[in-house]
Image (cartoon, rainbow, N blue to C red):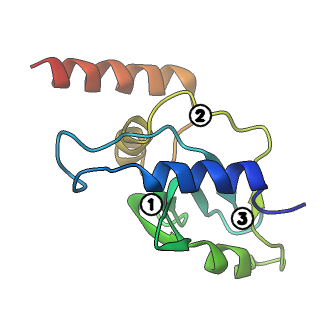
């Protein structure tokens, strides 16, 4: 299976090309993750939202290497493609993943759980908390 389809690559590129303000400001774009990649035998997971317009190998998203410290950051797609787990298996794309929230919701839930969370009720709760914080 191809790690990233042309459709996914195009969406990551289009998100990266938007004129987003500096990360960390109130005006920054908060994209819905486009793709979930994972290592079936190493516990690493990535939820990616965009690629750098000047360097399409550089992607941004929520990165969880399975060590209890998920964080937002940049990762090279070529590095993900080269990773092999304990059994020698390559990273895969989760073909059944459909993001239901923006990256900030996944990041906040992950910081509380020390791993990427996909439980709908947990994510809905975190989304409501973030919405309330933004209204204040």
Q: How crowded is mark 3: few (under 14 residues within 10 Å), some or many (20 or more)?
A: many
Identity of the residue drawn at 78% across and 61% down: 92
Residue on which the image places disc 3: 39
Q: Is 79 on the left-hand or right-hand side of 15?
A: right
Q: Tell us which disc is closer to us: 1 or 2.
A: 2
Seen from the viewer's position, the closer of residues 86 and 9 is 9
Q: Where is residue 126 shown, x and y percent of the image?
A: 36, 27
Q: Is mark 3 on a helix, strand or loop?
A: loop
- Closer to the chain start, of discs 1 and 2, is 1
- What is the tally of numbered marks visible in this picture? 3
**Res 68 label:** 1
Residue on which the image places disc 2: 99
CA distance separating discs 3 and 2: 18 Å
Q: How crowded is mark 2: few (under 14 residues within 10 Å), some or many (20 or more)?
A: some
Marks 3 and 1 in Cβ contact (< 8 Å): no
Q: Is mark 2 on a helix, strand or loop?
A: loop
Seen from the viewer's position, the closer of residues 86 and 3 is 3
Identity of the residue drawn at 44% across and 40% down: 31
Q: In which quarter of the image is the N terminus?
A: bottom right
């Amino acid at each position: 299976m191809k790690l990233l389809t042309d459709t996914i690559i195009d969406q990551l590129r289009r998100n990266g090309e938007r004129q987003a303000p500096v990360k960390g400001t109130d005006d920054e774009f908060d994209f819905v993750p486009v793709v979930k990649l994972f290592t079936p035998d190493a516990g690493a997971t990535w939820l990616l939202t965009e690629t750098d317009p000047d360097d399409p190998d550089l992607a941004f998203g929520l990165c969880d290497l399975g060590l209890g410290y998920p964080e937002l950051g940049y990762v090279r797609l070529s590095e993900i493609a080269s990773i092999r787990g304990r059994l020698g298996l390559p990273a895969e794309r989760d073909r059944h993943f459909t993001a239901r929230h923006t990256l900030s919701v996944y990041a906040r839930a992950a910081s509380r759980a020390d791993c990427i969370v996909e439980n709908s009720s947990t994510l809905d709760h975190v989304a409501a908390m973030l919405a309330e914080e933004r209204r204040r």
